[in-house]
């Protein structure tokens, strides 16, 4: 875990204006810069960059934050990835404090280097020499153009069992390093030594979103060689379920189209990109899993699984797709003409069928609805019941009450089964404990818009630091801040001040880096505060008076309830005490509101 000091060091060595200008053109506008927002379509610039405070804010879409947030949004990167990118640009080494972590990080970096080196060797073997003839013929037979061979850095692993080891010796990589990278395997036949994992195979380098070669996919060229497709084993940098082939290119297209399409083969991805569908990716020989969803959601709100028409029904019925029912991503299924995978579709049928299949893709629930109707004779009572039973199995998995209700109505429309019957059947299938509804305290005051604004005012005053921060601490306890967001940020600011001795927007942005929603909130608060006139002492006094009045109103409501309850029970003494407290509260309020005479 890297310290906050390192994060601040990277941030202070980075100018947000320079970073953002490397992505979009900025225009000077007084003390700030303006541009058309890169995160949404707009004609009039509403994207502002503030060089003094080192933050950005778009008043069109609401996004905002510091330089880490910007890089995370633009690159669809995690915070550690954004930190590494900026640290590399600033030539600041990120050394984990723990010796074991440093050693692990060093091994990972070495594996990336070895994989990139091996990819270069494989690529050269495909392009040059007699050994790569068969591989080049296969590439040509699949209709892959030379530009795609170069773009995806395709390669060829020779037949020799020792070739990669011999090349490693020349480069200075020993056998153990090649084993760690997944390129070599120790012999188990008693002879000792090692041999190359990939032999006489077309090589597909698997590249992450930071352009690092993390592993390889390899297709056998000899029909007798098994398995037909072979992947790198799991290594410190490679786990099959965490990567998608082609995502390093597709993420750019996804930011424009708002969608990613998933196919099943490496050559399918390449064919799609070659024909203009650059939003296409593939799993690495595994079924879609929750790890893939995490990746997909980062880059697009819509995901389309593209299947051969013969296999679509089977694939869409797989339980591995069930998790999409509860993910905040729109998941659809596209069906190609029967007997054609995407690569065949382009080479044999032309451009139109693939594009049409994607455009006509159906939502998973609707697709399963159609499958159920097709599998059963819904003209008969028994067939219709079987189809409904099949769909109820899917309905039972949906967590969202709103979505499930909409789907129940849809099933009723299609099959004519009353909603009450469907709900009864769903009740029978319910699994696990019913979640208790949260209990709302009768005395908790609802948070109003003014509470939110006053909470932000307190945070803005705290960000001034120094005497103003101390005055806020002495005047208003943290638990009396009027909104959850103000209490959360107030606690964060106090923690930073205690640790660093000073506080300001820069430190707060660094503390919330990695949380895009919180970064946007801080950007909002800082932007509002920079435009506010008025003496901080007066602003704090007004805030304190508002909170006192808010407290009095809550106390009055409580006493009124107590008085009414006492009256209902015939408790004369209790009613009297509540009345006296109410009267005293009213006198105190009147005293505070009475104008002071100057004698």
Image (spheres, rainbow, N blue to C red):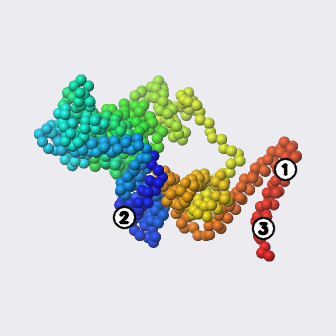
Quarter where residue 474 is shown: bottom right
- What crowding class fits label 1: few (fewer than 14 Cα within 10 Å), some (14-19), or many (20 or more)? some
For numbered disc 1, what is the local secondary structure? helix
| Residue 511, placed above or below residue 263 | below
**Mark 3: few/some/many CA within 10 Å (<14, 14-19, 20+):** few
| Residue to which mark 2 is pinned | 25
The residue shown at (49%, 50%) is 515
Question: For the view shown, which residue lies furthest in the right direction?
Answer: 572
| Numbered circle sitting on residue 594 | 3
- Disc 1 from disc 2: Cα separation: 69 Å
Residue at point 36%, 56% (across, down)? 91
Residue 33 appears in the rendering: yes
Per the image, label 3 sits on a secondary structure element best described as: loop
Q: Residues within 10 Å of mark 2 (few under 14, many from 20)?
A: few
**Of callouts 2 and 3, the N-terminal one:** 2
Taking the image as shown, residue 213 lies to the left or right of residue 591, namely: left
Whole-percent x, y for residue 188 in the image: 26, 25
Asked whether residue 244 appears in the rendered view, the answer is no
Residue at image location 19% in from the left, 42% down from the top:
170
Q: Earlier in the sequence, mark 1 or mark 2?
A: 2
Where does the image place residue 310, in percent across and percent down from the top left?
A: 31, 32
Q: Is residue 233 left or right of residue 541?
A: left
In percent of width and height, residue 531 lies at 54, 67
Distance Cα–Cα, label 1 vs label 3: 26 Å
Task: Name the residue tied to disc 1.
Answer: 577
């Amino acid at each position: 875990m890297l310290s906050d000091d390192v994060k601040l060091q990277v941030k202070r060595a980075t100018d947000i204006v320079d970073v953002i200008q490397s992505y979009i053109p900025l225009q000077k506008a007084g003390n700030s810069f303006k541009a058309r927002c890169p995160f949404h379509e707009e004609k009039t610039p509403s994207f502002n960059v503030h060089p003094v405070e080192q933050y950005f804010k778009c008043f069109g879409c609401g996004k905002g934050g510091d330089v880490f947030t910007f890089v995370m949004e633009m690159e669809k990167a995690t915070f550690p990835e954004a930190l590494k990118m900026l640290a590399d640009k600033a030539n600041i080494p990120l050394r984990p404090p723990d010796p074991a972590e440093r050693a692990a990080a060093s091994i990972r970096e070495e594996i990336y280097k070895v994989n990139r080196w091996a990819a270069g060797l494989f690529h050269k073997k495909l392009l040059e020499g007699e050994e790569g003839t068969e591989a080049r013929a296969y590439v040509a037979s699949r209709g892959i153009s030379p530009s795609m061979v170069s773009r995806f850095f395709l390669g060829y692993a020779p037949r020799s069992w020792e070739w990669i080891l011999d090349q490693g010796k020349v480069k200075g990589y020993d056998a153990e390093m090649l084993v760690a990278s997944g390129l070599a395997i120790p012999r188990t036949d008693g002879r000792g030594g090692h041999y190359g994992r990939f032999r006489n195979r077309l090589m597909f380098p698997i590249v992450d979103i930071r352009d690092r070669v993390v592993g390889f996919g390899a297709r056998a060229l000899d029909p007798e060689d098994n398995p037909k497709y072979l992947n790198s084993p799991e290594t410190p940098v490679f786990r099959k379920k965490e990567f998608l082939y082609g995502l390093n290119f597709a993420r750019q297209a996804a930011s424009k189209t708002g969608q990613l399409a998933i196919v099943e083969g490496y050559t399918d991805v390449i064919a799609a990109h070659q024909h203009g569908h650059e939003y296409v990716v593939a799993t690495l020989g595994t079924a879609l899993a929750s790890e893939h969803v995490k990746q997909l959601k980062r880059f697009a709100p819509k995901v389309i699984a593209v299947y051969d028409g013969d296999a679509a029904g089977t694939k869409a019925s797989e339980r591995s797709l069930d998790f999409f029912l509860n993910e905040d991503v729109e998941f659809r299924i596209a069906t190609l003409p029967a007997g054609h995978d995407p690569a065949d579709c382009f080479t044999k049928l032309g451009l139109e069928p693939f594009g049409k299949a994607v455009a006509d893709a159906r939502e998973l629930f609707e697709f399963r609805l159609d499958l159920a109707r097709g599998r059963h004779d819904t003209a008969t009572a028994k067939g219709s019941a079987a189809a409904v039973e099949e769909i109820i199995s899917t309905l039972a998995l949906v967590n969202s009450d709103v979505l499930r209700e909409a789907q129940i109505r849809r099933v009723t429309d299609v099959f004519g089964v009353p909603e009450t019957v469907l709900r009864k059947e769903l009740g029978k299938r319910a699994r696990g404990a019913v979640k208790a509804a949260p209990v709302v305290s009768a005395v908790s005051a609802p948070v109003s818009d003014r509470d939110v604004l006053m909470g932000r005012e307190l945070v803005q005053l705290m960000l001034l630091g120094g005497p103003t921060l101390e005055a806020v601490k002495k005047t208003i306890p943290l638990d009396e801040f009027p909104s959850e967001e103000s209490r959360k940020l107030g606690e964060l600011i106090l923690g930073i001040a205690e640790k660093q001795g000073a506080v300001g927007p820069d430190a707060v942005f660094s503390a919330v880096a990695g949380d895009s929603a919180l970064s946007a909130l801080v950007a909002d608060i800082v932007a509002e505060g920079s435009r506010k006139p008025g003496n901080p002492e007066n602003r704090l006094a007004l805030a304190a008076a508002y909170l006192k009045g808010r407290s009095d109103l809550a106390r009055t409501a409580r006493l009124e309830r107590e008085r009414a309850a006492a009256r209902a029970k015939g408790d004369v003494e209790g009613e009297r005490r509540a009345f006296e407290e109410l009267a005293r509260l009213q006198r105190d309020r009147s005293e505070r509101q009475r104008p002071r005479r100057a004698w």
